[in-house]
Amino acid sequence: MYRYRSQGNINAFTSRWQTGFPLSCANRVTYYTVPVGDNTAAPIGEKRVFIDNVTPDFWKRSKQGAIILNGMYASKLTRKSSGTTNASHSTVTPYCTAPNVSQTFTYGGTYFIALFDYYAEHVGNTPIDLGDDIHRLYDEIWTRCMADRQKGLANLSESLAELDKTISMLLHPFNGISQLTRDLRRNGKRKKGFEKVSAGSKDFISFVSSEWLRYRYGITPLVSDVKAVMKALKKQYSALQPKVVSSHATGNMQKTSQVTGYFLASPYRVDYGISRAHQVSVRATHIDKYKPDVFDDLGLTFHNVVGLAWELTHYSFVVDWFANVGDLMYANIPRASLTSQGGVVSTRRIVTTFYYPLSTTNIAPAVWTISGSFGDNYLMVDETKERFVRGDNYTALVIKSDFRSDNFNRVADAFAIANQLLRSIGF
């Protein structure tokens, strides 16, 4: 049974202007107000809607340990006008010959958006098309969530498999500095001027790249493993009662656009801008019941051992930057000790459109003089939240559209690896 609730309302607003002119040369009237009327294309207000699936005896069943997953939809629509217009235009030549009274129009309030809706286009909050990227994001996040089931505090299976490399790194911590010193001395003896500076710069960049990779994929994992072991040894594990454990994964994407244009509303040419944004956040949650033990937290499990084939593949983590190969493999490794309780995917979309004036220009200077400017703008925001149940068996290989170039570690890793590869081929 579905339940519908709503709150608030979105109403039409009235734009207003003032006109000032004489009704006749003999009977002059200074000003009076003329309302435009209801402008239903540009309303204001806020409205919320909530729709969910009602489960009978939900609280009673939850207290008894039942895991209940259901769908949900919620929306929040906002229409808001800010600022105010204060503009006017008057006739250049007198409207009456004596005593030289000019015809004047003075505008105030939410006037720009009313003119935009009339002369340009009806306002609307159409989302930017995300294409297939949004479906890839759903599949990527859900697959990652499934891969993280029974994920412990560490992955000692991989650490033990690479123990020889770790010992070598710890035994020779200053190899990089020694190599840099030798290279700089050799270049100083063999090269002069620009060639010496260039060779030294390459050696220094190679040193920094090597040490960065050592820190990221050697020292940092080692420190994390030590912390995980200490934490696992302090925990108390009980085999009497299975625990409800949830796995999570999140991701987001956003597209924006900016356009400008103009419309003519004599004697004004109004230049305007429209900013649009479409933001999507995805969160996947999967719930399992099992009896966690110290081996789970340390990563000494069947699926971690099976996954070693991929983890020990040279530059496998680079492949995972561009496609979710590792997540797909881990998601499909059987976990016999887990009892699945199901999972859901929650999404949050925010679609925004902002209309605003840029400038006004007199297009009839021989007839009219203008003063002031259009100062009101208009904001439309549609925020929706959805939750739907996802099947355990669905996982997918995804070619990622976002390299995460805004992430410092990702860019630094890519630069360091590229430098190492170029140095290895004598670039």
Image (tube, rainbow, N blue to C red):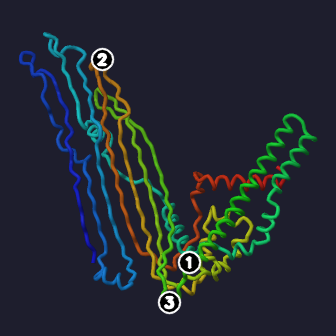
Query: Is label 1 in a helix, a strand or a loop?
Result: loop
| Residue 18 pos. (x, y %) | 18, 30
Mark toward the start of the polypeptide (2 vs 1): 1
In this figure, which residue is indicated by the disc labeled 2? 366
Q: Amino acid at mark 1?
A: Lys
3 and 1 marks in contact (CB < 8 Å): no
The N terminus sits in image quarter = bottom left
Q: Amino acid at mark 2?
A: Ala
User: Comparing marks 3 and 1, which lies closer to the viewer?
Assistant: 1
In this figure, which residue is indicated by the disc labeled 1? 235
Compared with 362, 195 (above or below) is below
In this figure, which residue is indicated by the disc labeled 3? 240
Q: Amino acid at mark 3?
A: Leu
Q: CA distance from mark 3 to mark 1?
A: 15 Å
Q: Does residue 32 appear to the left or right of 67 in the view shown?
A: left
Query: Is label 3 in a helix, a strand or a loop?
Result: loop
Q: CA distance from mark 2 to mark 3?
A: 92 Å
Among the 4 quarters of the image, the one containing residue 152? bottom right
User: Comparing marks 2 and 3, which lies closer to the viewer?
Assistant: 3
Mark toward the start of the polypeptide (2 vs 3): 3
